[in-house]
Amino acid sequence: MDSTQFILVPYTFKHILRIGLLLFLLPNYIFSQKIENLKTEALGDNIVITYDIQGGDPGDFFNITIYSSHNNFNSPITKVSGDVGVNLKEGKGKRIQWEAKSELGNYKGSLTIEIEVKVVAPLSLKTQLAHVKRGKAIQLVWRGGDQNQKIKIELLKDGNVEGTIGTIANSGAYTWSVPAKQKTGKDYMLRLNGGKETTTSLAFAVHPKVPGWIKFGIPVALGTVAVLFIPKSSEGSETPSKLIGPPDILN
């Protein structure tokens, strides 16, 4: 997931060179709450941005990129150091220093600084199954992985690859139509392969679409009723005479 915060910066080099002070306004719109406690200050010709980054899931990393309106946000600011770049961990008291005068040259006027946050999550399957039924559609949901890498979904049985369910773009979701003739049994698993990463589900079972006891329940019940109608002889023993029961069953 990507998010962006904007900071409006009334800025001129005269302010930096003569008084070394910039006025930063709080963001007037926040797209995400991943970045909190955003503060800025001027230190000579540099701008320092401090922030907290919160709200990620365990194992998440964050890529932080800064853009400026001086080039219409066409390319990131380059003369930055500190807690900016790729694979940053969640935490408080993050600090970025931007060599603003060195990068902007003779630019004068107001600036809008854009801070872009990209969550880099490990590939993980969110959908966990206890069992599935043949002929049913199952919604599989996952997160993470390389957005530019396709995801290969495989069906495993007893740890061995039984087949490939599909190879799709990393959209985070896929509808799996369980084949009507899929072999039933236990110890099935799903494996998602994203090229650099793989993740495997917990074991689950494949069940018939209609349980066998439902299919044969009615005939068994009628058979039980028919047995109850077996007549007995006068001596008290059972006779092999014709069963008495529903005509459409026993005739």
Image: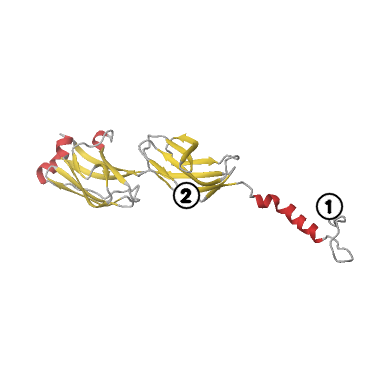
Residue type of the residue flagged with mark 2? Gln
State the image quarter where residue 241 is shown.
Answer: bottom right
Q: Earlier in the sequence, mark 1 or mark 2?
A: 2
Three-letter amino acid code of the residue under disc 1: Leu
Left or right: residue 182 compared with residue 193: right
Q: CA distance from mark 1 to mark 2?
A: 49 Å
Which residue is at a point 80% across and 57% down the rendered structure image?
A: 226
Mark 1 Cα shell of 10 Å, populated few (<14), some (14-19), many (≥20): few
Neighbour tally class for label 2: few under 14, some 14-19, many 20 plus, Cα within 10 Å: some
- Which label sits on residue 128? 2
Q: Nearer the viewer, residue 81 or 37?
A: 81
SS class of the residue under badge 2? loop
Q: How is the image coloured?
A: secondary structure
- Residue occupied by mark 1: 250
Out of 69 and 81, give the one closest to the viewer: 81
Disc 1 is placed on an element classified as helix
